[in-house]
Image: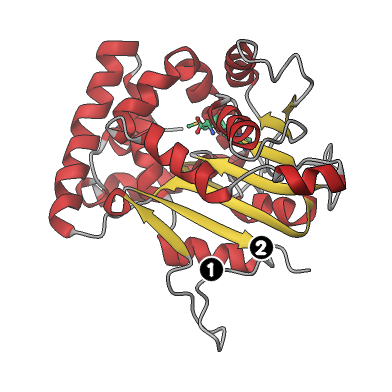
Amino acid sequence: MSAAVPRAAKRLRLAPSRSWVCSECRRSFVSSVRQRQQQHGQEDKTTHFGFETISESMKASKVAGVFSSVASNYDAMNDFMSLGIHRLWKDHFVRSLNPGVQYASLQEQQEGQRILDIAGGSGDIAIRMLDHATNINRDNKTHVIVSDINPDMLAEGRKRLSTTSYQADGRVDYLEANAEDLSAVKSSSIDLYTVAFGIRNFTHKDKALEEAFRVLKPGGVFACLEFAPQLSNPLFNAVYKRWSFSAIPLIGQIVAADRDSYQYLVESIERFPSQPEFAQMIKDAGFLIPGQKPDGTSIEGGWEDLSMGIAAIHKGVKPL
Ligand SMILES: C[S@@+](CC[C@H](N)C(=O)[O-])C[C@H]1O[C@@H](n2cnc3c(N)ncnc32)[C@H](O)[C@@H]1O
């Protein structure tokens, strides 16, 4: 690779917004990646890692590096990224799904729900799910599999869940797996599949959606909570983008001595599909989407914006 390439890559990665990225640098970097692939006889496609263009085969390990690095500062990271509101979003996300089986039905069917929380390493969603099932629905049978590609994040979740009674009661299991290949999970075995702030990091989001569809029972629900690339109000969007691109990497540097990981996390939000695009991807995977127009031509309101569209909840149902 020429000496100019690492410099170009660095400029791409640190560029604060897409429009400020030097197009010459972007072209030179992208073509250098292609050249390198040809030199090594690779057919590997490229993808993005934040604003960087990298080969697809490198993405999972680069993402793993980010989350291994932030695992021990995970709460602080989420607080910076969402201005502290992620806790309220997660509460709302879980309440909206009403996990668990209501007490009366539980007496009849004797079984709780089987929930799969993908990219769930922090344990945040699993704990809320089990709290809701237990305290609201009086269901002490619902079970959660916490799955994550990263053993360091899974270790964080395990540590948190070990302070609750759920682990001792056998209501939680852990699975180290890539969301794009859930071969360890049986087809049509899951009632509720959740993914919170994880899917934007996946290399092939379409494969993850296909796997979600496969593992869900007919009638099962796919639910995703994720940052969105644009706020609905252009003025707030400009303020929020300025905050996230200038402050978050700086805070990452000061608090965790890790500017690069935080820079990636901000950039990865920009790269995530818009709400209509992502709703269409969910539909393409086979799910029924709430809010779809009767003629099926387009999707309107098949998601719920949170805090003016800083984040959004998407849902889909596997047809019966
Ligand atoms: C921002 S954290 C979210 C953790 C948790 N869901 C929450 O909301 O607190 C993103 C998680 O996605 C996981 N992740 C990234 N790529 C993944 C993949 N391909 N398959 C499964 N998990 C992945 C990371 O390891 C990390 O734990």
* Colouring of the image: secondary structure
Dot 2 lies on which element? strand
Residue receiving disc 2: 317
Ligand 1 placement by image quarter? top right
Above or below, 183 relative to 319: above
Foreground disc of the pair 1, 2 = 2
Residue at position x 53%, y 18% in the image? 68
Q: Amino acid at mark 2?
A: Val
Q: Earlier in the sequence, mark 1 or mark 2?
A: 1
Dot 1 lies on which element? helix
Residue at position x 54%, y 69% in the image? 290
List x then y, in percent, for residue 67: 51, 23
List x then y, in percent, for residue 273: 44, 57
Quadrant of the rendered image containing residue 169 = top right
Residue receiving disc 1: 280
Foreground of the two, 86 or 202? 86
List x then y, in percent, for residue 181: 75, 42
State the CA–CA distance, disc 1 to disc 2: 13 Å
In the image, taking residue 88 as reference, residue 178 lies left or right, namely right
Residue at position x 20%, y 43% in the image? 240
Q: Amino acid at mark 1?
A: Gln
In the rendered image, which quarter contains the C terminus? Answer: bottom right
Foreground of the two, 101 or 79? 101
Count residues near mark 2 (Cα–Cα under 10 Å), then give few for <14, some for 14-19, many for 20+. many
Q: Residue furthest front?
A: 104
In the image, taking residue 253 as reference, residue 317 lies left or right, namely right
Quadrant of the rendered image containing residue 265 = top left
Above or below, 78 relative to 30: above
